[in-house]
Image (cartoon, grey):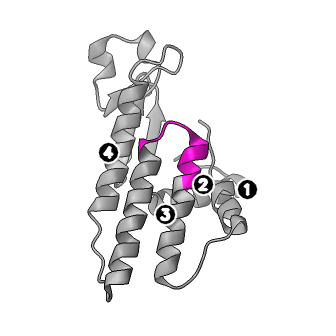
Amino acid sequence: MRQTESIAEQEGIRRAQAAVQNADIVLWIASPEDRSPLPAIDNMIAVASKADLYDAETRESAFDISVSAKTGFAMDKLEKMIKERLKTDITDCSLDLITDRQYDQAQEAVREFENALSTSTLDVAAFYITRGLNRIKALEGKDISETALDALFSKFCIGK
């Protein structure tokens, strides 16, 4: 991320860096013409944009995948990469569970998150995520509210 003299921009950069550190996956999207070195970030997928404008050799440089938002080129492959990365993260976690009930709740949560990953619409994915979060909260004897979900999803930022 760049350096700046602006106090407000410095705070934005600090917050972005904190978000990157806590993210399950980081999509680093850049044009192949940008020759800046890619950052070393855990669990990052380096995405080259504008694949429709470059030859295969240029596209295959330092990036994990090249896509085109304009033509849709390789967007399905990017989606698959993201799902596989999340699925690996979900299924590789180990939990020290005390009771069979807790184990069952954790297994149900994993199934709900897998269902969310396999759906193609955001509203259905949100439904499964909510169910999965409720299963996790049930481990503590709690339930997740609509207010908590609103707070969670308000933190998402989609942009360049």
**Residue 105 within the segment the image draws in magenta:** no
Q: Which residue is outermost to the bottom?
A: 98
What residue would you read off at disc 3? Answer: 132
Point out residue 135 in the picture as x, y percentages from the top left corner. 48, 71
CA gap, disc 3 and disc 2: 32 Å
> Residue 95: horizontal and vertical position, in percent?
30, 77
Q: Which quadrant holds residue 42? A: bottom left
Q: Is residue 94 left or right of residue 3?
A: left
Looking at the image, do the residues carrying marks 4 and 3 touch, with CB atoms under 8 Å apart? Answer: no
The label nearer to you, 4 versus 3, is: 3
Magenta residue span: 118-127
Q: Quick one: 136 or 69, which is closer to the camera?
A: 136
Query: Could you tell me how far apart the alpha carbons at marks 4 and 1 are, in whole angstroms?
Result: 36 Å
Q: Residue at x 32, y 17 (%)?
A: 58
> Sequence order check: which comes first, mark 3 or mark 2?
2
Task: Mark yes or no: residue 33 visible.
Answer: yes
The residue tagged with tag 4: helix, strand or loop?
helix
Kind of residue indicated by mark 3: Gly
